[in-house]
Amino acid sequence: MRRVLPDVADDVDIEAEYAVAADLPWHVRTSFISSADGAVSVNGRAGGLGNAGDRRVFALLRDLSDVILVGAGTAREEKYAAPRPTGARLERRRRHGVGDAPAMAVVSERLEFDTGSDLFPDDEPRTIVITSESSPPQRRAELAPYADVLVCGKRAVDLGEAASAMRARGLRRVHFEGGPRLFGTAMAGGLVDELCLTLAPLLTGPGAGRIVAGAELADPSPLLLRHVLEEDGYLFLRYTMSGR
């Protein structure tokens, strides 16, 4: 089952490895990287674990999506900007029938954003901010000129409501990028269809978190292995949730 990650020149081959059936009405795919001993970050950032192959796969998963869903903490720590693909990546998106750029959807309760950052572009698609009724109403009003603010849930963000709101906007392919606590909430709600996990050939020692945080799941969630790709000791694992 293990195969070598297709070369840069064979992007069509790597697209085939991660393609989602065109007739699926809705699909949520999450991706993480982890060290061999389970760490999700180095010095607080996931980028310290990756290699060129991981960056290629991550870019591909974004290019196959309608919307990128991420927690505000991860967006700040990883210095997120709203993607605007060009060149071969723009051609790839058009080839797969998604819009020229994915929408960015950020989950936040406190709404502590710098609206002058690259996370909030002046052009389309506008960034979506997903919050709850418990968030500060004044901050919601202040954000409205810069983003589409969706109130989903009362005391906390209801990811099920958020999913319905994205589907209503025609955003059918979700690339969910964490962080771990938000992933735990999505898992508990049965909202994840697929996990793409890069396993880095590194030992980082104790201290870093895992890809899932928050409340314990009632039961372990079985996964079905779709493929294993390898490059320079890095393993690229694609799983679907059992029964999905």
Image (cartoon, rainbow, N blue to C red):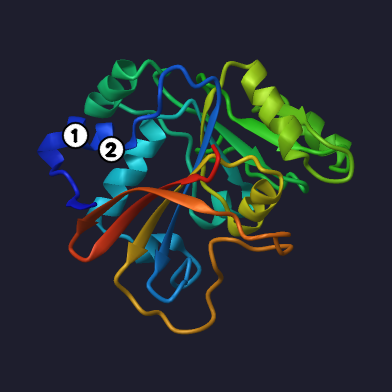
Residue name at image x 27 percent, y 45 percent:
56
| Rendered image quadrant of residue 117 | top right
Toward the viewer: 52 or 27? 27
Residue name at image x 85 percent, y 36 percent:
138
| Rendered image quadrant of residue 50 | bottom left
Image quarter hosting the C terminus? top right
Q: Where is residue 221 in the image (x, y as percent from the top left)?
A: 59, 55
Examine the rendered structure and indicate whether residue 233 appears above or below residue 14: below
Q: Label 2: which residue?
A: 17
Examine the rendered structure and indicate whether residue 176 appears above or below residue 95: below
Examine the rendered structure and indicate whether residue 125 appears above or below residue 243: above
Badge 2 element: helix
Q: Label 1: which residue?
A: 13
Residue 238 in sight from this viewpoint: yes
| Rendered image quadrant of residue 77 | bottom right
147 displayed left or right of 125: right
Three-letter amino acid code at the position of disc 1: Asp
Residue name at image x 73 percent, y 26 percent:
144
Three-letter amino acid code at the position of disc 2: Glu
